[in-house]
């Protein structure tokens, strides 16, 4: 499998829910927020990352790519390890199995998460459920009164 095929798998999950692709980035513009999915290659080989997040339209970006940023993964250690293996093309996972399993993970995890957030209030609620806000910019914490 190659990067082009991985991109196609992500496309198949995101385009049906309205995302538009621009190279290795998918964007879905809503009234108050913009949803972003970013596909990134590791500098250490054929490993990839699927990052996603949100831009709050009422706030300046101040050199940020996104106001709220997350990576595709799981709090379950075994599931997270499997996701990393699926996105690492330097192992011997069968291409057909990788495609089916990665598509399922993207639907179950990524699509589910980004579909839950359509407005600022949804994003604020998601942030309030996090164990910490260390990775959230101060401008966002101030905006939502989370300081």
Image: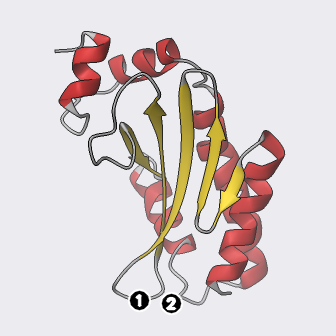
Residue occupied by mark 1 = 45
The mark closer to the camera, 2 or 1, is 1
Query: x, y percentage for residue 28?
Result: 65, 40
Q: Secondary structure at mark 2?
A: loop
Q: Secondary structure at mark 1?
A: loop
Most foreground residue, 1 or 78: 1
Left or right, 39 with respect to 116, comes to left
Q: Quadrant of the C terminus?
A: top left
Residue drawn at x 68%, y 87% as measured from the top left:
1
Residue occupied by mark 2 = 90
Rendered image quadrant of residue 124: top left
Q: Is residue 26 above or below residue 143?
A: below
Disc 2: CA contacts within 10 A as few (<14), some (14-19) or many (>=20): few
* Disc number placed over residue 67 in the picture, else none: none
How far separated are the C-alphas under marks 2 and 1?
Answer: 8 Å
Residue drawn at x 34%, y 83% as measured from the top left:
43
Most foreground residue, 140 or 42: 140
In the picture as drawn, the residue positioned furthest to the right comes out as 16
Left or right, 82 with respect to 15, comes to left
Q: Are marks 2 and 1 in contact (CB under 8 Å)?
A: yes
Residue drawn at x 28%, y 48% as measured from the top left:
63
């Amino acid at each position: 499998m190659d990067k082009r095929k991985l991109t196609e798998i992500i496309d198949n999950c995101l385009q049906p829910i309205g995302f538009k692709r621009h190279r290795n980035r998918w964007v879905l513009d809503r009234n108050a927020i913009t949803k972003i999915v970013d596909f990134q290659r590791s500098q250490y080989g054929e490993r990839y990352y699927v990052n996603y997040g949100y831009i709050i339209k009422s706030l300046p970006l101040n050199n940020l790519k996104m106001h709220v940023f997350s990576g595709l993964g799981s709090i379950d250690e075994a599931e997270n390890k499997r996701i990393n293996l699926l996105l690492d093309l330097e192992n011997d996972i069968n291409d057909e199995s990788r495609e089916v399993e990665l598509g399922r993970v993207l639907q179950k995890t990524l699509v589910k998460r980004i579909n839950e957030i359509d407005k600022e209030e949804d994003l604020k609620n998601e942030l309030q459920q996090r164990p910490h806000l260390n990775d959230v910019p101060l401008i966002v914490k101030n905006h939502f009164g989370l300081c």
